[in-house]
Amino acid sequence: MSRKDQSTADFANLVKEHYEGLYKFAWSLSKNEEDAADLTQNTFLTWARKGHTLRDQAKAKSWLFTTLYREFLRQYRRGQKVSPMDQELMETREDPDLPHTARKLEGREALEALQSLEEAYREPLTLFYLEDMAYKDIAEVLDIPIGTVMSRLSRGKAQLKSILTEKKKK
Amino acid sequence: MNTSEARYVLSNSPSGADASTDPQLREAMEMAASDPELQNIREASVAFDDAFREALTRCPAPQAPVDALAREMAAHAPAANRSLAWLHPTAFAAAAVLILFLALTFTFWTPPEAPSSTTPATLASTLPAAPLLKATEELYLNMKPAFRSREGARIAEYLRSHDVLVPTSFPRTLSLDHGIACDVLDVNGNRVSLICFETPDGSGKVHLFSFTREDFPDFPVPESPWMEPSVRSSARAIWADQHSIHVLYSDDGEKNLRQLLDI
């Protein structure tokens, strides 16, 4: 196989492996399917131009998610606000039937529930649930300390459960 | 940590191998070891994570962006792979020798040129608002369009959504449908639109920077394209219409631009 063919095949494999995760992450960030498609496409095009400069190709996944996230921040230029933890949320006894509720969710409903979280919680939680990313990888992609990842994941999960509980009541 | 805090931590800390690195969760897990209620909470939490993760996998991503990407890559395959060729040591060494040879030749053999009386005056020296051209050159050298699309309508929509005029004065052979990317830039507080095009015959790329004319009221711009060589092997042409000042760069030099502008 020529170098060019190999390069094309590698690229196709990379798209196959990471497209779905990147697209859903982009959708969760932008809350818009068209923007998600553009962000995902641009991320792969950036890889086509610059990916060869990455010395450790094992870090391709982290590189792709970081690139997509930075592009999202660049386009949407916004500040992240984290609201103080709601004491009420902390004291709420949660519905023991929640795992069952989650099991019955349609894929789109699950993604919409993620989208309705506060931005600062949505980002790490999406990477956690969609990509099963380790804390340190989430910290690298979002460029935040690992302790912040832990607390945001925990608060985000609490908020997510609260949203699903409310949804179930309706 | 009291029981209420442990309940919260066990219920909301995400599950997975990484969880053991969380000191709060570790402490809560130690408490759960001797408390069945806390144990149940943790089990429900892990079950929730598994169920929610599974629900997300039931949401398929659309195929259209992958197809669009494949088209984009096919159209630009040589460019995308070009850089890889330089990784080959032989090619790299040959390039280094060539560059060294050219540098030495230029240094020792090129006699200094006297200004030629036949060289036409460039815009930069004849127009008083040279800073605009200088700024455009900077933009050209550093451009990295934020939005990529091969649909003229989407390019126009992007520009409109960023509050800049969509240029209407294109060279005869070019239209918005030849656009491949665009951006909205800033020059000293003035907004500038950039549209990148592939030439109709697919032989090269040109980049159109459009300034709002009223931002530069004293800039005497020609109504028909005026062309001059630019940085590296590129060439640029400048003209104006009622609302905008346009500067069009061609990556492939003067000949390409002349063909495009039909001048």
Image: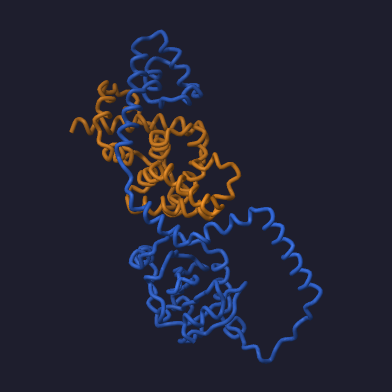
Q: Quadrant of residue B111?
A: bottom right
| Image colouring | by chain
The residue depicted at 37 percent of the width and 14 percent of the height is B39
The count of marks equals 0
Judge by depth and name the residue closer to the eye, B137 or B175: B175
Q: Residue at x 42, y 34 (%)?
A: A128
The x, y position of residue B82, in whole percent, is 57, 59
x, y percent for residue A132: 43, 33
Quarter of the picture containing the N terminus of chain B is top left
Quadrant in the picture for residue B140: bottom right
Looking at this rendering, what residue extends furthest in the bottom direction?
B117
Residue found farthest to the top = B34
Q: Is residue A83 visible?
A: no
Q: Residue furthest front?
A: A1
Shown in orange, the chain is: A
Q: Would residue B188 be found to the left or right of residue B7 on screen?
A: right
Chain coloured blue here: B
* Residue A162 visible (yes or no): yes
Q: Nearer the viewer, residue B131 or B199?
A: B199
Q: Position of residue B194 (x, y in %)?
A: 46, 68
* Residue occupying image coordinates x 41% and y 42%: A81
Counting from the top left corner in percent of width and height, residue A58 is at: 54, 39
Q: Does residue A59 sit above or below B118 in this rendering?
A: above
In the displayed structure, B165 sits above or below B18; it is: below
- Seen from the viewer's position, the closer of residues B167 and B251 is B251
Q: Extreme right residue here?
A: B108
| Residue placed most toward the observer, A20 or A8 | A8
